[in-house]
Amino acid sequence: MIKGFFIAFVLLICSTSCVAVKEYDKVNLNDPDMALSEKKLDLNISTFHSYREAAVGVNGGKTGGGCGCN
Amino acid sequence: MMKIKESIYLSFFLFAIITWAQAQEDVSNTTYKKRVLETSEIDFLSSYYTQDGNNAAVSGGIGSEDLTDVTGTIVIAIPINDDDVLTIDAGISAYTSASSSNIDPFDGDSPADPFVASSGASKQDVWSSVVLGYSHSSDSRNDIVSAKMSVSKEFDYFSLGFGGGYTKLFNQKNTEVSINANVYLDTWRAIYPVELRPFTANGNGIANGLFLNNSITGNTNYNPIFTPFKDENRNSYAVGLGFSQILSKKLQGSLLVDFVQQEGVLSTPFQRVYFSDVADSFIDNFHLADAIEQLPDSRFKIAFGGRLHYYINEVFVVRSYYRYYKDDWGVNSHTASLEVPIKITDKFTVYPSYRFYNQTAADYFAPYNVHLSASEFYTSDYDLSKYTANQFGIGVTYTDIFTNFHLWRFGLKSIDLKYNNYQRDSGLKASIISTGLKFIVD
């Protein structure tokens, strides 16, 4: 799995050399729903997930701090 | 473990190479720079969360998990100058919990029962938190440095956190790499199940008033395994790496990896455990604890995943997410989610979503009354059990880019409302309603 991740990582790095969308062509990419992050509204949901589930990380939510024990 | 360490080193190496290489071709344009944040923004967020189930960890894997939580959060982003932004995130959360109430199940009027909430002080608590963040962007907007500090507190727990990050954009802002690190220094104020407290070194054991005022049934020679934690600290160290890439005029994605090392008291002091090789003792309908949860004092977690977002047309966007998680307690997990924002009009967007989650059980998990007393580590917390969860959500957002509606100097930019329903195949059900109001300061 970890090996697969790094292969994907390297492939994405390689892809940077062939794609360069100009600023004036980013109107669709700048749509708020295209943002590559969780919305503020979903932060409380992410916190609930981090309390009820073992898995944490790579979602912009908590990776530590707080007990989440209730 | 060595492979994971090697992966960390490799990540740092790759990050350093990319940063150095792209710095060589970074052409800054400092003749004009747009403010990072034009004006102050204020978000008022709130949520109402309820859950119920029959596997409460406080009562060793059986009992009511009924819990209600109301959270209010205010997030203020203030532009300090053209380049710097200060963010203040303050939240308060109040909850009532049936399982927490059963830390002392004998303080109510009705017979003690793990499926009935007790009326004692532990049935409710308030959590409060403040996070201060500061970010600085370079003139070219290709370098962003950030720092943050957080404090949170509840009755039996205190957390102090600080961290920082660096983001580098290059390839005409088509590519972004980032690294962040966070440290959380937490402290328990350990609270133990009430029937165990007389069994500390200075306690009077079975001669305590609790056992004199309440008749023990089953094994009347109640003699639990109990030693309070000497160290009440829990520290977490997290490092995250990110890489995002524009893949076309309508498609962009990101890859992320997080490493988390936790040390200290990772057990929850008030979670009971029952052993199959120890005779059962009861008061009323409540099984007296054989011990409290015991978990290793270190845990290493690694999570990696990514997002892929596609702009189909002016109406539809597809937001997809996947995460793989693994830790050295034996938990493996997959998370996948899909959200399809649908722009109904220029002001209203609907957000249907689905999220899938599964995990394997931790090595130390067993259900109620299954553990053996000779084991070193044990828990009956179903949050560490094997399960699959499905979550369905629907949300709606009203957006007014012209902020026509005003409250004093605050122009309303958007209103959000979202409902999510979460169900585990182990029986836990939860619902959360979230609302958000975003204002722009004139």
Image: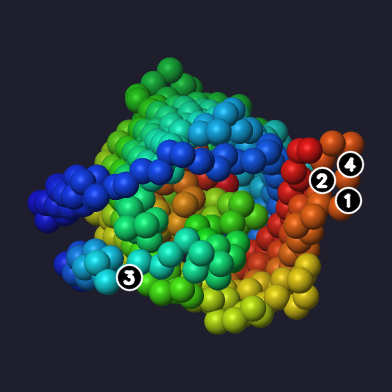
Tell me how the rendering is colored.
rainbow
**Three-letter code, disc 3:** Val
Would you call the spot at circle 3 few (<14 residues within 10 Å), some (14-19), or many (20 or more)? some
State the CA–CA distance, disc 4 to disc 2: 6 Å
| Secondary structure type for disc 2 | strand
State the CA–CA distance, disc 4 to disc 1: 7 Å
Read off the residue under disc 4: B407
Read off the residue under disc 1: B405
Read off the residue under disc 2: B411
**Three-letter code, disc 4:** Leu
Would you call the spot at circle 1 few (<14 residues within 10 Å), some (14-19), or many (20 or more)? few
In the rendered image, is residue B40 in sight? yes
| Secondary structure type for disc 3 | loop
Residue at (81% x, 52% y) in the render? B403
Query: Does residue B293 appear to the left or right of B61 in the view shown?
Result: left
Is disc 2 in the same subunit as disc 1? yes
The residue nearer to you, when weighing B441 against B438, is: B441
Q: Chain of mark 2?
A: B
The residue nearer to you, when weighing B120 against B12, is: B12
State the CA–CA distance, disc 2 to disc 1: 6 Å
Residue at (24% x, 50% y) in the render? B25
Quarter of the image for residue B302 reads: bottom left
State the CA–CA distance, disc 3 to disc 4: 44 Å
Read off the residue under disc 3: A19
Is disc 4 in the same subunit as disc 2? yes
Q: Chain of mark 1?
A: B
| Secondary structure type for disc 1 | loop
* Residue B324 locus on image (x, y percent): 33, 66
